Image (tube, grey):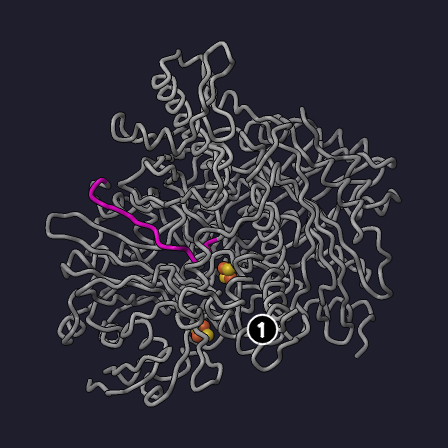
């Protein structure tokens, strides 16, 4: 029989009862009453409070650490330093992670951990940190990625040589990798162009800014088992990476996930969790560590700063003929930015024959970057969409028509080698054209911006199971995380398959011992992939129920079928039997034949790429440079919206995160290499009064590889935002900004330089 | 360090607590009483996740010392529902998907309830400004504002 990956049995004409409705999510009641337990909400008997001492320097040799006074403080039960972490080779994934979690030879950024304590109260732990004496030899530092590439720049890692460059390299560098992506012949493409446009763009790091700081409790027992409770986007990845850096058999580590108060990519790798585990082993007591907001800003996340130089050309009838880019991605103190996403995704909405990009990943004295919705893509699309708009204007075409003319379709091949199956970009653009927003007349003085975005969408290793109770209720369990409501969407798909109301289904998130491996919940993969394994598990349970009903009726299993939540004889030839519901079969056979269940683990494939279009109207205050977002519409292909309210929430939340990044959010460093705005007062994310309602249009071009046609929807909504806001500002003031964030001082400078400001 | 004995009423129940002088009311609620519905997002008064009512006034519990709660009456998210009947704000947040991850939700519900007590018929702009001290990173605020508006309408008896 064909597997679900070979044949999803997607049926566009299926009458859906549950999928496409908006039931209250099952984790909701606990979250509106304060009962839900997040990372910081666990308390165990005898638990200690852990705190981490962090470097005040951007770059220094760690000469010595004296913890004796801290150890002597009453109430302190354990102190940990680099000596408590096995030494792993620098420049390997484990060696890098270990050094990021606890500095070894050097500190590489302001906030880099150097020691940790566990004490009977937070207050004692804080006092103990002050008693630790650290001797540093301060080194010159480098913050800016382009400066870090220059000869003579301070070097972070003496072992580092650039990957992707031919020939021997004698001297260390800060350039981790140079990646060339190309197709066709750009020279020929530009020669065929009537218009050539180009620009240089830059962006600063923004932080994921989940409202819940990382929190965990680790509890090590004397026989070497470690239990870890934490907020995480990947229990198995945490288990395996912690095992790797502490050199513990990862089977001895059990990671359970709390509710997660936002992650957006930032909770895909561990920070304080291994430190808590070490402190717990040393003290033989449970240890809790909750990061402060200051620590979250200085030491976790953020996203890559970038510089890009982009050139595109088109014919006078609006066909893009070539695209070229030079890109620099700052990755912080250690590699791992996933910068390849930038060159792969930047032009991918458009069907281009000729592309040439060179992208470099560079280390500098900042916290190691972490994933954020569509890592390394939105800040590059910011420049691409400026040029696309400029080309449309030069050709004299409507902004959406120009994009339609170049839109990627089924059968087109991408620069990363994938040939698109059924995708919905054209439909999304057409839907954007039909919105009231696009048709509305722009009020005097406002500007309107259009931008499009793309994300691959991910899939991969996923495990799930489903059990039917003797009473006919359904429990499903997955080893993925729930970042914004996947439990209800999974329950809905199970309910649809089994023909039961969604209230009969409950979804549980497993710990690492209950379920096999799962890739991190990231890249918009979870509802797609976990949905696949849950539907497959439900189909196994259905097959089993058919076998049992056939046995009860004494007919061959081929003679029965499962329709609308019950097993029926497939024709009157089989015999006259009353259909048997799930509840009846479960009640009759659970004891005699065991529970009815299904279980699936697979490397899921077939994630359907997602496309979106954003429309933004803004007004620019010519006296202050402040940009006011007046109207916002997100149009995006969801394949199929399982829970439309949740899909809208993804679109709206992504758009407003992008607005913050576009207009305001950035890391600001002082001359001393220290972060100057590590708090929500000075790093200001959008507040309710900053933004308007966000209108949404859910386009549904099903992905036939999925039983219900869905595509991931979490990443795409951030990819067009920066470009759309930039284009709207450009339309309002006649000058397209090129530097992110487009904050009031920068806009004011543009206005002043052009003689347009009113002061 | 010597601890200070305080007596405080939380959601109608009287508690006696020994707290360290540098503990905030948020620390006391969470670490001493294990009422973890009140959340910590920043500890600096910037995110509103820790919002509670202190003698009927909306406050960031991270900016109040535990010892200041002596003799005061505190209301937290755990006291918002009436037994097993949810407050209309809670119900509307559920029905209209006013929460995604839910970490900001307790603080937003406490603040929104206080708003509706003072102004049963707020405009969208009034809600947006009232909640400007409550950060949400997931929703973009759209469905939060709509949930508050729907609850207000329901509570006005429309
Ligand atoms: S924790 Fe009190 S305002 Fe953020
Ligand atoms: S729902 Fe996640 S921060 Fe508001």
On screen, residue A216 above or below A130:
above
x, y percent for residue A109:
40, 61
- The 10 Å Cα crowd at callout 1, few under 14, some 14 to 19, many 20 or more, is some
x, y percent for residue A320:
77, 35
Is A366 in front, or is A711? A711
The residue located at (41%, 48%) in the rendering is: A233
Q: Secondary structure at mark 1?
A: helix
Residue range (magenta):
A251-263
Quarter the C terminus of chain B occupies: bottom right
The residue located at (46%, 63%) in the rendering is: A32
x, y percent for residue A215:
34, 60
Q: Is residue A282 visible?
A: yes
The residue located at (58%, 31%) in the rendering is: A416
Q: Residue furthest left?
A: A222
Q: Which residue carries the number 1 mark?
A: B132
Ligand 1 is in which quadrant of the figure?
Answer: bottom left
Q: Mark 1 near ligand 1 (CB under 8 Å)?
A: no
Q: Is residue A671 visible?
A: no
x, y percent for residue A246:
23, 48
The answer for which chain carries disc 1 is: B
């Amino acid at each position: 029989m064909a597997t679900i990956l070979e044949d999803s049995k997607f049926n566009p004409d299926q009458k859906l009862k549950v999928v496409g409705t908006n039931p209250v999510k099952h984790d909701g009641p606990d979250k509106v009453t304060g009962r839900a337990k997040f990372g910081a909400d666990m308390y165990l008997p005898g638990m200690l409070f852990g705190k981490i001492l962090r470097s005040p320097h951007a770059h220094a040799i760690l000469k010595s650490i004296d913890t004796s006074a801290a150890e002597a403080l009453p109430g302190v039960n354990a102190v940990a330093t680099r000596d408590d972490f096995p030494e792993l080779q620098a420049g390997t994934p484990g060696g890098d992670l270990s050094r990021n979690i606890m500095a070894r030879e050097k500190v590489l950024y302001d906030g880099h951990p150097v020691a940790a304590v566990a004490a009977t109260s937070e207050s004692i732990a804080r006092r103990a940190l002050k008693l630790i004496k650290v001797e540093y030899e301060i080194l010159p530092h480098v913050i800016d990625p382009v400066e870090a590439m220059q000869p003579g720049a301070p070097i972070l890692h003496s072992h580092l040589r650039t990957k992707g460059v031919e020939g021997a390299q004698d001297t260390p560098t800060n350039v981790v990798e140079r990646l060339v992506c190309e197709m066709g012949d750009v020279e020929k493409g530009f020669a065929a162009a009537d218009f050539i446009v180009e620009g240089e763009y830059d962006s600063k790091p923004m932080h994921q800014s989940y409202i819940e700081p990382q929190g965990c409790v680790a509890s090590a027992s004397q026989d070497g088992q470690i239990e870890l409770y934490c907020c995480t986007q990947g229990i198995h990845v945490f288990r395996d990476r912690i095992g790797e850096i502490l050199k513990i058999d990862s089977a001895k580590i059990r990671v359970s996930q709390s509710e997660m108060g936002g992650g957006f990519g930032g909770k895909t790798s561990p920070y304080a969790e291994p430190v808590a585990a070490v402190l717990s082993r040393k003290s033989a007591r449970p240890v809790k560590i909750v990061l402060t907001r200051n620590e979250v800003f200085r030491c976790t996340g953020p996203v890559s700063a970038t510089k890009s130089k982009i050139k595109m050309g088109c014919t006078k009838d609006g066909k893009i003929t070539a695209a070229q880019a030079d890109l620099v991605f700052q990755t912080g103190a250690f590699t791992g930015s996933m910068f390849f996403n930038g060159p792969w995704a930047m032009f991918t909405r458009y069907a281009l024959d000729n592309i040439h990009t060179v992208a470099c990943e560079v280390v500098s004295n900042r916290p190691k970057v972490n994933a954020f919705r569509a890592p390394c893509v939105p800040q590059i699309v910011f420049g691409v969409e400026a040029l696309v708009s400029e080309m449309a204007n030069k050709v004299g075409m409507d902004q959406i028509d120009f994009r339609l003319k170049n839109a990627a379709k089924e059968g087109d091949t991408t620069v990363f080698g994938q040939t698109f199956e059924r995708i919905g970009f054209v439909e999304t653009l057409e839907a954007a054209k039909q919105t009231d927003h696009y048709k509305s007349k722009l009020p005097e003085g406002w500007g309107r911006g259009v931008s499009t975005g793309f994300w691959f969408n991910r899939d991969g290793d996923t495990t799930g199971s489903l059990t039917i109770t003797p009473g006919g209720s359904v429990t499903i369990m997955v080893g993925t995380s729930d970042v914004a409501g996947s439990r209800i969407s999974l329950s809905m798909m199970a309910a649809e398959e089994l023909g039961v109301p969604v209230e009969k289904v409950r979804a549980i998130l497993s710990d690492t011992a209950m379920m096999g491996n799962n890739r991190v919940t990231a890249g918009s993969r979870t509802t797609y992939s976990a949905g696949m394994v849950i539907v497959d598990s439900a189909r196994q349970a259905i097959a089993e129920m058919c076998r049992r009903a056939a046995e009860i009726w004494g007919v061959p299993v081929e003679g029965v079928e499962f329709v609308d939540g019950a097993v029926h004889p497939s024709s009157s030839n089989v015999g006259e039997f009353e259909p048997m519901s799930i509840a009846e079969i479960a009640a009759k056979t659970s004891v005699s034949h065991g529970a009815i269940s299904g279980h699936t683990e697979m490397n899921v494939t077939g994630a359907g790429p997602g496309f979106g279009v954003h429309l933004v109207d803004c007004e620019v205050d010519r006296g202050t440079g402040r940009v006011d977002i007046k109207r916002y519409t997100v149009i995006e292909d969801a394949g199929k919206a399982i829970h439309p309210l949740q899909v809208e929430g993804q679109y709206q939340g992504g758009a407003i995160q992008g607005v913050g990044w576009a207009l305001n959010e950035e890391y600001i460093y002082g001359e001393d290499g220290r972060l100057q705005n590590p708090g929500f007062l000075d790093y200001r994310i959008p507040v309710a009064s900053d933004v308007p309602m966000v209108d949404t249009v859910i386009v549904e071009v099903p992905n036939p590889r999925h039983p219900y046609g869905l595509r991931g929807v979490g990443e795409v909504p951030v990819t067009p935002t920066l470009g759309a806001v930039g284009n709207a500002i450009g339309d309002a003031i006649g000058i397209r900004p090129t530097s992110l964030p487009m904050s009031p001082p920068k806009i004011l400078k543009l206005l002043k330089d052009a003689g347009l400001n009113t002061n | 360090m010597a601890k200070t004995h305080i007596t405080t009423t939380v959601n109608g129940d009287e508690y006696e607590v020994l707290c360290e002088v540098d503990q905030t009311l948020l620390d006391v609620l969470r670490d001493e009483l294990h009422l973890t519905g009140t959340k910590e997002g920043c500890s600096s008064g910037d995110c509103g996740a820790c919002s509670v009512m202190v003698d009927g006034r909306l406050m960031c519990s991270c900016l109040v010392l535990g010892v200041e709660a002596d003799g005061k009456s505190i209301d937290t998210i755990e006291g918002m529902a009436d037994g097993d009947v949810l407050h209309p704000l809670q119900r509307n947040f559920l029905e209209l998907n006013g929460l995604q991850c839910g970490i900001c939700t307790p603080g937003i519900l406490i603040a929104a309830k206080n708003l509706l007590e003072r102004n049963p018929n707020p405009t969208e702009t009034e809600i947006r400004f009232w909640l400007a001290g409550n950060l949400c990173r997931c929703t973009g605020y759209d469905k939060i504002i709509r949930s508050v508006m729907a609850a207000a309408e329901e509570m006005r008896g429309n």
